[in-house]
Image (tube, rainbow, N blue to C red):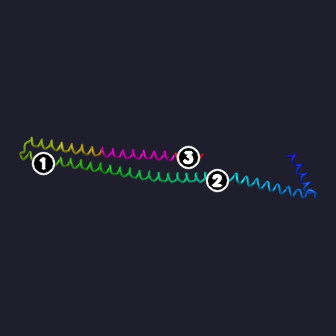
Amino acid sequence: MAEGEPEMQGKAVEENSPAKAEKSKDELWETYVSLQEELNRAVKEKGPFENERSSLTTSWNTSKQRLEASKARMREKLRVNQEVQGQRRKEIEERKRNLEELKTAQQEELCELKMAAKSQIKKGCSEVEMQEKKCSLQVERAEQEVSANILMRKLELEHQEKIKELHVRHEERVKDRTVWASPPS
């Protein structure tokens, strides 16, 4: 810098002289023209970079909006899935209660039949008939319990399948979302 300063002072002295005034105007004009051309070139060179930056910014913002929309959809689907699971749990609990009520009703009916059987024995029915009735009632009760257990197991398996299916869909969506969520390079 120290070397350039004396030159600048020398140019200032030369430009201030009246003989160099005309030359300095021409030089200034040439400098202006060359600076203008350089500015035009810089603007032309900057244009594609600005376009690319604008394109990348637009793409990034679009991807960001898509990601937010996907997240919102995933939250909504997760909420819906949780509601569905809650409803299924309630249905299973209700069916369990119904089965318990059914078992209770069967036991009450069995007790009534036993009481009726005892009263019939007192009336003179043979013990063999009573045993046959008792066996048939026990078989009927066992069949009802088996069918109730089968129904319960079937409901549980359906519930597990639904949960598994929801989990697989959720995992696929999360995998898809991670592919879309990566920023542009």
Amino acid carrying mark 2 in the image:
Asn
Residue 43's mark? none
Query: Which residue in the structure is indicated by mark 2?
Result: 51
Amino acid carrying mark 1 in the image:
Ala
Please name the residue shown 87% across and 47% down the image: 4
- Label located before the other in sequence (2 or 3): 2
Q: Is residue 145 left or right of residue 185?
A: left
Query: Which residue in the structure is indicated by mark 1?
Result: 116
Magenta stretch? 153-178
Q: Position of residue 68 (x, y in %)?
A: 52, 53
SS at badge 3: loop
Q: Residues within 10 Å of mark 3 (few under 14, many from 20)?
A: few
Query: Which residue in the structure is indicated by mark 3?
Result: 182
User: Is residue 177 on the magenta stretch?
Assistant: yes
Q: Position of residue 73 (x, y in %)?
A: 47, 53
> How far apart are the two marked residues, 2 and 3, measured between alpha carbons?
22 Å
- Which of the two residues, 76 or 7, is positioned nearer the viewer here? 7
Q: Are marks 1 and 3 in contact (CB under 8 Å)?
A: no
